[in-house]
Amino acid sequence: MIKKIFAIGMLTATVFISCKDNQNQKNTDSSNTEQTASKDVVTQSLTNNDGETIELPFDNSEGTATVNFKGETIVLE
């Protein structure tokens, strides 16, 4: 019985400590977002704090999305 109470107490303490730590974390990623739209293609680009940009054009007529990052292109269906 004492082992069960001790285990429940430790679990409760762990949950409270982890929740407390999450409140102290700050969102340091201040990325810039651009979005342009044409008839069937919507393009969004994101830039992180280091100046790296990722472009995400979505082609609604073909049902594809293309990821352009650091010279690499990936087409997703």
Image (spheres, grey):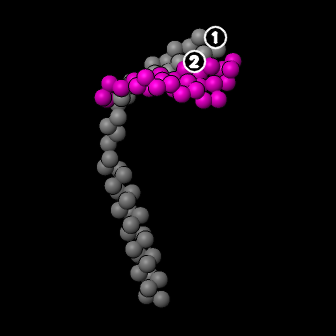
Q: Residues within 10 Å of mark 2 (few under 14, many from 20)?
A: some
Give the percent coordinates (x, y) of residue 25.
32, 47
Q: Which residue is at the front of the view, 13 or 63? A: 63
Residue at 31% x, 49% y: name it: 24
Q: Which residue is at the front of the view, 3 or 31? A: 31
Q: CA distance from mark 1 to mark 2?
A: 8 Å
* Relative horizontal placement of residue 66, taking residue 30 as reference (left or right): right
What is the chief secondary structure element of the magenta stretch? strand
* Relative horizontal placement of residue 37, taking residue 70 as reference (left or right): right
For mark 1, give the secondary structure: loop
Q: Which mark is residue 57?
A: none
Residue at 48% x, 89% y: name it: 1
Q: Quadrant of the C terminus?
A: top right
- Is 51 within the magenta? yes
Q: Residue furthest front?
A: 72
The residues colored magenta run: 49-77
Residue at 58% x, 26% y: name it: 75
Q: Is residue 12 above or below residue 50?
A: below
Q: Which residue is mark 2?
A: 42
Q: Residues within 10 Å of mark 1 (few under 14, many from 20)?
A: few
Give the percent coordinates (x, y) of residue 61.
69, 18
